[in-house]
Amino acid sequence: MLRYMGEAKHDGLAVPGRVVLAHEPPFRIGPLAIDPPTRQVENGGLRETLEPRVMQVLVTLFRAGSAIVTRDDLIQRCWEGRVVGEDSINRVLSRIRHIAAGIGGGAFGIETITKVGYRLVAAKGEDRPPLLAPPRAAPGWNRRMLVAGAGAIATLAIGGAALWPALKTRAGPPPEAKALFDRAVIIRQQDNRQALAHLREAVRLAPEYGEAWGALALSYSIAIANEPPERVAGFDERLREAVRNAERYDPGNADAATALLPPPFFGKWSEVEPVYRTAIRQHPERAAAHGLLGTMLMDVGRWSDAVAALRAAKSRNPSSPVGRYKLIVSLWAAGRISAAEDEIDEAMKLWPQHGAIWQTKIKILALSGRPAQALALARDPASMPFEEADRPGHATRLLFLTALATQASGDVERAVKATRDKAREVETERLNMALQATVLGHVDLALDMLEGIYLRSGDWARSSFDTRWLATHPLFQPHARPLWREARFTRILNAVGLERYWRTTGTLPDYRQLR
């Protein structure tokens, strides 16, 4: 039986049986130092970032020691029990074998036991796998030490309230609280729920840690904006409490300043822009406000301004794949294709199978006159993110790319049919499908879909209409160009308030200089 892993009862946020990377301590396999929360593996100064699924499987195999891990074990712990094809598991194992042979220095491998499962094995000549040694460079992440330290600091917080202000003045927050804060900032882009858990614990250990209160407020705001209402019940009051404490203990905290007006920005562009600009003036060194401003500017079609903001965010936080993806999209939409492709090349080295970056590379290739290259990349199993191959939408993508590459009438007809079917089947894909219909030459169909999305009218009206989830930035990307001169398109912009935003702020979207 596998050992207990990833099941820490941390505010009830972990899923029983699942490997939760945020809760896994660092470990070593021979010379390879592995840090699950950051997904980093390192050996002698060489460093790689693993995909989340790959790291989950590696953790599962490591925790099993020399025991065999069955296919069902892997699916339960790393795929949350979902139906997974054999190819998906094999791709993950192939990636780990590549890591073992490359940066791992050949110190271990993965043995396949036919019809039984898999296990880590030592390199030839070793008696056993060199497992179980925690990395000496990261003692702060040893779980026993963290829990023990947390208990000690909690005792001080309860019994010696006068000690914390003096401690904060002399040396900043306690190391355990600072470690939790640092970890939360790293993982928030991938797992905001786990970031919330870390930040709650940080402020419990250090009740006057203003920076952690600000980060907690921002994580609450992200959850409120992006999760179903039933999952965030009571978060509004917790958000306000976190903002109050951030302002009390860290006046002018940038995260707190932006937390009360979180994304998404639909319909609130004029309201949120000055808040983010004020936060940037007060805390120019913080990436969060730069990133939020850049995202908002994307949604109003101000691509050149978005590039400047997102470059500023990248310079302050280069480890965010989501921020890098947004910068790539903005560069491409601003007409700076070479710069966008340079960023993609760098991003794919850092995050070789990040879904959004991979999709964006395919999109730019397809829509800049290289559809055959895009199709080849989409069909390449070695470069495909592990989750993408299992998504039904991938078949629609392949039909679309094939139509662009061949221009054959039969391929175009099949792609249009698949686009219609996908838009009917999945409402959240309707905006992407509208732009896909535009590229395939069906502008009226695209406008029908857009009116259903934004005006809730016609045959394509959304059945569940929640304006919080609406985005507008795809309307201003290059492949939307055939829509820009259409009267129906202008009607949509008026109805959602974008024309009012441009008029009151005295700005123009980039596309009006291009059309």
Image (cartoon, rainbow, N blue to C red):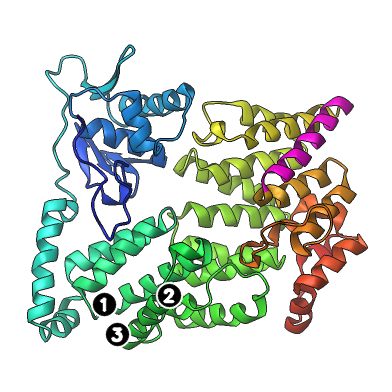
Q: Residue at x 64, y 64 (%)?
A: 466
* Badge 3 amino acid: Tyr
Please tell me the numbered disc located at residue 255.
Answer: 2
Label 3 Cα neighbours within 10 Å, binned few <14 / some 14-19 / many ≥20? some
- For label 3, the residue is 249
Work out whether 248 lies above or below 490: below
Q: Nearer the viewer, residue 279 or 493?
A: 493
Cβ–Cβ below 8 Å for labels 1 and 3?
Answer: yes
Work out whether 185 lies above or below 401: below
Percent across and percent down for residue 296 are 62, 69
* Badge 2 amino acid: Asp
467 sits to left or right of 42: right
* Badge 1 amino acid: Tyr
Q: Residue at x 13, y 71 (%)?
A: 154
192 sits to left or right of 456: left
Please tell me the numbered disc located at residue 209.
Answer: 1
146 sits to left or right of 46: left
Numbered disc 2: secondary structure:
helix
